[in-house]
Amino acid sequence: MLSFLITTINSSTSILLGALGILFMQLAGVLNIGAESMMLIGAFVGVLGSSMFGNVWGGVLMTVVCVGITGLVFGFCTIMMKANQVVVGVAFNILAEGLTTTLYRGVFGMQQGTLKVASFGRIGPFSLPVYFGFFLVIALTIFFYKTKFGLEIRGAGEYPLAIDSMGLSVNKIRYISVVIGSIIIGLGGAYLSLGQLSFFTEDMVSGRGFIALAAVIFGRYLPIGTWLAVLVFGIGETLVYRLQAINCGISLQLILMIPYVLTVVIVSFFGQKASGPQMLGIPFDKDAQ
């Protein structure tokens, strides 16, 4: 049982970081369908940085810089240009898949998963990013509900006109939230390539960005609720590993479907009851309010 719990926590950390990054953005009113792309970029540049600098922290630094820039571009498209946030997210997902594949083949050659790079060591049963995920759940709970800037971020998602009437810039708050949220999402991707594995493969995120998005909805847009939701999805992933290991006779394709079926079922049952920020996905235009 303890082994199952440890595996669940380890395997769900990438989704947890992705979900907390999405939560950061969505509480500010910015919908991010493109989390998959940011996790994929984080996974790739994490390996690239670890290879270039010869240590895992070089990979983390590359992830923070590159995904932070990706967040700036995402923010420019959705906040400044007021483009449809769903369309921008889909475009980012398509672009990241092609871009990371092309760059990986260009830098490391055609063979997949053969380049081993420095990765996170373990402290007890978990690697450092797992403890960072625990810390982030507590820190964001305090930040969003006990600090002035946290309340302003939630205000930008719920009542942006009220935030504007206080003399604050809604777009600036949203921009900061998008960049910070993107970096956290990217670290979720880097954990995949540098925490669970020590290499990059094409499309290695495999829908975890969308599962993270579902976890935010299932978790009622709360950091702790999101964490609990992620653990449910983590159980699905752990079952995939365990069922494959014991050769239970079930088709591999059916086993691999478990986390995705779980996502569809949970969102179908609980998604309608979850209420996000009132202005989620709606660009702020003072003159149109």
Image: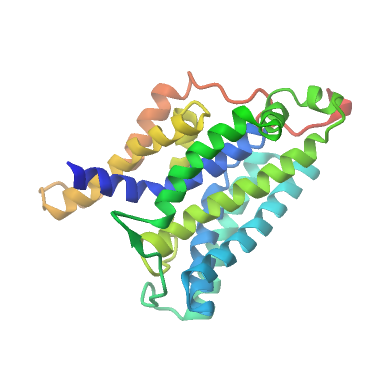
Quadrant, the C terminus: top right
The way the protein has been coloured in the rendering is: rainbow
Picture layout, residue 205 above or below residue 213 = below
Residue 165 appears left or right of 232? right
Above or below, comparing residue 269 to residue 25 in the picture: above
162 relative to 221 in the view: left or right: right
Residue reaching furthest top?
Answer: 273
> In this orientation, which residue lies closer to the viewer: 146 or 91?
146
Instruction: Using the image as rendered, state which of residue 36 and residue 250 is in the foreground.
Output: 36
Q: Position of residue 274 (x, y in %)?
A: 50, 22
Indicate left or right for 266 with 99 as reference: left
Q: Position of residue 144 (x, y in %)?
A: 61, 32
Point 81% across, 24% down: residue: 161
Up the image or down, 12 lies above or below 166; here it is below
User: x, y (%) of residue 85?
Assistant: 67, 40
Q: Position of residue 252 (x, y in %)?
A: 21, 52
Question: Which residue appears at 56% of the width and 55% of the height?
Answer: 94
Is 203 placed above or below 207 here? Answer: below
Which residue is more in the foreground, 240 or 188? Answer: 188
Q: Locate the N terminus and report the quarter of the image it occupies.
A: top left
